[in-house]
Image (cartoon, rainbow, N blue to C red):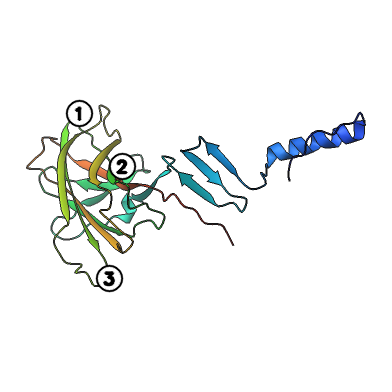
Amino acid sequence: MNLQPPPQTDDVVELRKWCEDVYRFLEFPVFPGGVNIGDTTNYTEIKNDGEINLHGTARVDKYEWIAAQGLAAHGAKAATWVTFANGITAAWQFADNADNAVTFNMMLPDDMDFTEASYLCCGWSSPVISGDCYWLAEYLMTEVDDDTDAVADDSTGALYTSSATADGMVRSLLQTYAANTFDANSMCFHGAITRDVSEDALGGVAHLHGITLWYTKKKLGAATT
């Protein structure tokens, strides 16, 4: 409904109806011609058909989460699937004496803004307190007719410190993808995460609970038809 100005009357019935209209408007407001939220440069535009557009620096950050169950482990470097003592938590276990790995494939989100940077993070833990674990992330992006067995487009490795709590969750940034690394033709995002024990000093196992692709949403929306 559209909110009308208060009636110029002393009629109690009309005034009561107007108050009821105000209450309903506050529950579900409708602005004829749409509404802008923000300043004249950086704002969110909501059109009268419900389409949402972002202008200037107005942005929406989103993520795609792949839980441990969505990761694969196979071959000589395969990590081991384990269930914790609580009977609730399960994760991929990376040994302290071997370079274990997991792999994944995913499509890039269809609302991803390729002109903005994106990030690959992982959620992991270890029973070792405040130890350093070396995670190596690799990825290969393929388009139609690209070789899916090609070498990685990029490999990034670094030391990450485990939680000060035994088996405490840690979120670590594995890779940063600069603006325009991907484009509308990017079809499949192949990745691998390896623990390189020769580079770390954790002194115990590590558990990978999942990975997250953080990205910025496109500025332009679309009306529902």
Where does the image place residue 10, in percent across and percent down from the top left?
91, 28
Q: How many marks?
A: 3
Mark 3 or mark 1, which is nearer the start of the sequence? 1
Q: Relative to 159, does residue 68 appear above or below in the rendering?
A: below
Q: Nearer the viewer, mark 1 or mark 3?
A: 3
Q: Relative to 90, does residue 128 appear above or below in the rendering?
A: above
Which of 126/198 is in front?
198
Q: Nearer the viewer, mark 3 or mark 2?
A: 3
Which of 156/3 is in front?
3
Mark 3 Cα shell of 10 Å, populated few (<14), some (14-19), many (≥20): few
- Residue kind at label 2, given as amino acid type: Phe
Mark 2 or mark 3, which is nearer the start of the sequence? 2
- Residue kind at label 1, given as amino acid type: Ser
- In the image, taking residue 158 as reference, residue 109 lies left or right, namely right
Q: Which residue is mark 2?
A: 84
Q: Which residue is mark 1?
A: 130
Q: CA distance from mark 2 to mark 1?
A: 20 Å
Where does the image place residue 171, in percent across and percent down from the top left?
29, 37
Where does the image place residue 97, in percent across and percent down from the top left?
10, 44
**Residue drawn at the location 24% of the way across and 45% of the way down:** 176
Q: Residue furthest top?
A: 164
Q: Secondary structure at mark 1?
A: loop
Disc assigned to residue 144: 3
Q: CA distance from mark 3 to mark 2?
A: 41 Å
Mark 2 Cα shell of 10 Å, populated few (<14), some (14-19), many (≥20): few
